[in-house]
Amino acid sequence: MTDFNGYIQTIRLAAKDALPEGYPFNIPVIENFKELRLHPKVTYLIGDNGMGKSTLLEAIAVGLGFNAEGGTKNFNFSTQATHSNLHNYLKFTKGAHQPKDGFFLRGESFYNVASEIDRIGDGIHQWYGDKSLHEQSHGESFWALFMNRFGGNGVYILDEPESALSVTRQMALLARMNHLVNKRSQFIIATHSPIVLAYPDADIYQLTASGLEKVPYRDTDIYRLYKGFLDNPENVTRLLLEEEEETSP
């Protein structure tokens, strides 16, 4: 894999004078967005709720040709069109290789993807473990997707994949990611999980009001907050409950 430098190398936003006003261009991280340089293996987007992770990830996926609600590039259904027009203003620099596979996973609309798979029928379930995703638990359906549909040589865009996974399955996801990376796959992931975030050969971008900042794993807010809690859960919980009682009416 020494000659593989990723399918998507950089993502840039159009010049400021070419951008419309209003949402999502008034989100601070988008206002200050210049360029996202992707790792050829794994790139993470992290940040607090409302910072714009999912908005940016969704725009990247749609800009690359994926369905806004999730799925492969062959999915073209729409339950409710809620995505922004940010994708129209993103510019992609691509590598020399063309991906043969790809998938956009959105935890919040995965139910709609599973319904579309059932609607299509005609043997499509063989790519998802030979069983309707609706006939499995939420976590099992996610895992069936990772293990059966993700075949390698692809771009996989995941929005909070940990949302349906146990801790042990999150750990197993790292191993599955590594298997696919070794088959020339590239991941772009938004996550709140310190486990999912732990893939060693990756770049982590923390979204702030000032834009995108590349940070080492142990310097991320996710790692520091989880570690601080797990090192002394009793003390942290006590402080949180005392603070809640002081602010209660």
Image (cartoon, rainbow, N blue to C red):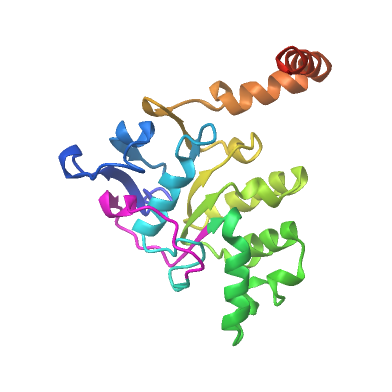
- Based on the displayed image, in which of its 4 quarters is residue 116 positioned? bottom right
As drawn, which residue projects farthest toward the right?
234
Q: Position of residue 231 (x, y in %)?
A: 76, 18
User: Relative to the observer, which residue lies in front, 102 or 201?
Assistant: 102
- Based on the displayed image, in which of its 4 quarters is residue 25 positioned? top left
Q: Position of residue 88 (x, y in %)?
A: 28, 55
- Is residue 83 within the magenta segment? yes
Vertically, is 133 above or below 200? below
Q: Residue at x 56, y 36 (%)?
A: 200
190 displayed left or right of 211: right
Q: Residue at x 58, y 23 (%)?
A: 218
User: Relative to the observer, which residue lies in front, 36 or 57?
Assistant: 57
Region rendered in magenta = 78-104
Q: Residue at x 79, y 18 (%)?
A: 241
54 displayed left or right of 198: left
As drawn, which residue projects farthest toward the front?
249
As drawn, which residue projects farthest toward the left?
17
As drawn, which residue projects farthest toward the bottom?
122
Please state, as top left, top right, bottom left or bottom right, where the C terminus lies in the image: top right
Q: Let me know if residue 74 appears in the view.
A: yes
Vertically, is 48 above or below 66? above
- Is residue 206 within the magenta segment? no
Q: Position of residue 196 (x, y in %)?
A: 62, 41
